[in-house]
Amino acid sequence: MRKPVLNGIFIPHITPFTHEGELDLKALRICVKFWLESGVSGFVPCGSNGEAPYLNRQERMKVIETVVDEVNGKAPVIAETGSMSTKETIEFTKDAEALGADAALIVTPFYFKPANREMQEHYRLISEAVDIPIVVYNVPIFTGLMLEVAFIHQLISENKKIIGLKDSSGNIGAITETIRLVGEEISVLAGTADVTLPTLLLGGKGAVLAVANVFPKLCTQLYETFKSGKYEEAKRLQMQITFVNEILVKRYNQLSAIKEALKLLGLPAGYPRKPALPLEDKEKEVIQNLLKQMDEQ
């Protein structure tokens, strides 16, 4: 099993759709080139920002195939392959492996709120079925299910295919304890922008950030500044990232807000897939003002 290096800023990128709701793979390639040139450390196709719940199996495969081809080995590709059932998750993960993904990001199944022993078996069976490594995805804002730190510790100790954790809980106490327990064994990655610097200071290896879709250089600059030991500058950059995150991710439907911001930057981000709708005119003005304000800094 080849293990990719999970350090730095990873982009859980959008999936461009046409006005009619079809995949726009040409637009996706243009966006991937933009992010690559901006210096991100890796790509996460078919994640939450990629509208994975709205993609069928064939569409997921097309997106992953396009990203792997366009990235062309320049950065790791960690495909999100989680689903509600173990059977389908294995199918999605095998697809990603066959298409050349470097690892699989797997969200916890949540519809029936599985017990810890059920989730442990879920990840065990996936690990046995594929050769690529696994990154566990803890995102209680969407799943309604917060992984317990003790369970994460047990899971990591028993499953050597797991090389990382994307923690999108925003719970800095839980992230701290997770890093204390398993931070030497796996890459703990912040999944929410406002705890990026705290996670790095505590020993986390990087972050998977929605705002990196729009501000990839700002996010990579934070990571590089931190690694250089320029902590005062890193604090300033964290404040900027927190500010834009509040608008792009928290204030509106992030699928629509991020795509609107990218379009204002001249990138073919396309439309969100229904039931998500584009922003209204007043909301678009807020995004436009945000970009103008950031450009002036």
Image: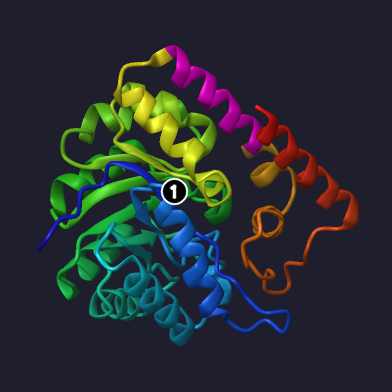
* Structural crowding at the residue carrying mark 1, measured as other residues with C-alpha within 10 Å and reported as few (<14), some (14–19) or many (≥20): some
Give the residue displayed 48% in from the left and 57% down from the top: 34
* Quarter of the rendering containing residue 291: top right
Please state if 105 lies on the left or on the right of 56 as rendered. Answer: left
Give the residue displayed 55% in from the left and 63% down from the top: 14
Q: Find the magenta span and give its range.
A: 232-244
Q: Quadrant of the N terminus?
A: bottom left
Q: Main secondary structure of the magenta part?
A: helix
Location of residue 202 in the rendering, given as x and y in whole percent from the top left corner? 32, 23
Location of residue 96 in the rendering, given as x and y in whole percent from the top left corner? 30, 75
Is residue 243 highlighted in magenta?
A: yes
Q: Nearer the viewer, residue 17 or 230?
A: 230
Location of residue 60 in the rendering, given as x and y in whole percent from the top left corner? 44, 78
Position above or below: 40 against 51? above
Render colour scheme: rainbow
Position above or below: 104 against 99? above
Please state if 16 lies on the left or on the right of 150 as rendered. Answer: right
Position above or below: 26 against 205? below
What residue is pinned by disc 1? 38
Location of residue 199 in the rendering, given as x and y in whole percent from the top left corner? 38, 28
Give the residue displayed 52% in from the left and 37% down from the top: 193
- Specify whether residue 272 is in view: yes
Considering every residue shown, the one lying at the far left of the view is 1
Q: Nearer the viewer, residue 283 or 136?
A: 283
Position above or below: 25 against 197? below
Please state if 121 lies on the left or on the right of 276 as rendered. Answer: left
